[in-house]
Image (tube, rainbow, N blue to C red):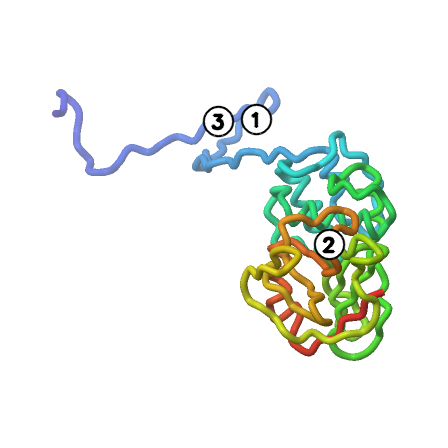
Amino acid sequence: MFTKGSRRTGRRPRLRAPVIAIGASLAVAVPQPAMAAVPAPVAFPASAVNALPSARPVAVSPSTPLRPGSSGDSVRILQRRLIEQGYWLGRVSGSYGLTTQQAVMAVQKVVGLPRTGVLDARTWQKLQAGARPRPRTKRAGRVIEISRSKQILMIVDSGRISTIVNTSTGRTPRATTPAGTWRFGRQIDRWHTAPLGRLYRPKFFFRGYAVHGSLSIPGYPASHGCARVSVPAMDLLWSRSGIRRGDRVVIY
């Protein structure tokens, strides 16, 4: 409805841009932009910011240790650093689960720290400075190395370590993991009940000795002579990037 004196033009009314006064005598018309959704800020702990990978090692003292059950950006940064150094944990998830705990324990074994599986300031400093062990074999092709003193298993491709996995070997002189060079042969793709316990997807290299998955991988020698790894790590070792039938294993 139109009141008296009004007329219909068929055009939409023009919007005036707001005017911002600058100084005492100058006014500038500024078009008003459309409002966009502003993403919420990401909370990032100060210790994690300092821990970002850089060209130089960075000494960091986490305000609280990271352990199983921890989660968030600090854990993601830890996981990326572990993967960069060759320690297997699966994928970067931001959750400090079994595979992250096993990778941290492997680092502690390599650098000579208490084998707790908890990331404290000393473990982080060692990891930042570089915590890669050196392989003993330089031959072409793939070789599996197991260090009984450090309690780690390494996949070595043409003299370069590609993967480091936490392991637990024989616990006593009568139940030791045999030193020497062997080849992987028989393998069982399931849980296998052996005379001394259950083995997950074992890969045998000498008589009844095998690399196999287990539900208990402590920081010390605890097996009856086999090399135990976690169940997820054993699944990795069954993949194409893991242990193949006929691969050499060097145990020392």
Q: Which residue is mark 2?
A: 223
Q: Secondary structure at mark 3?
A: strand
As shown in the figure, which amino acid type bears the numbered disc 1? Leu
Marks 1 and 2, how far apart in space?
84 Å
Q: Secondary structure at mark 2?
A: loop
Where's the C terminus, which quadrant?
A: bottom right
Q: Residue at x 64, y 59 (%)?
A: 195
Q: Secondary structure at mark 1?
A: strand
Q: Position of residue 46 (x, y in %)?
A: 73, 33
Dividing the picture into quadrants, the one containing residue 60 is top right
Which disc number belongs to residue 19? 3
Number of the front mark, 2 or 3:
2
Number of the front mark, 1 or 2:
2
Marks 1 and 3, how far apart in space?
10 Å
- Circle nearer the N terminus (2, 3): 3
Q: Position of residue 6 (x, y in %)?
A: 17, 25
As shown in the figure, which amino acid type bears the numbered disc 3? Val
Which disc number belongs to residue 26? 1
Q: Position of residue 68 (x, y in %)?
A: 65, 38
Dividing the picture into quadrants, the one containing residue 101 is top right
Q: Position of residue 1 (x, y in %)?
A: 12, 25
Q: Is residue 7 left or right of residue 210?
A: left
Dividing the picture into quadrants, the one containing residue 67 is top right
Q: Residue at x 81, y 34 (%)?
A: 61
Q: Residues within 10 Å of mark 2 (few under 14, many from 20)?
A: many
- Circle nearer the N terminus (1, 3): 3
As shown in the figure, which amino acid type bears the numbered disc 2? Ser
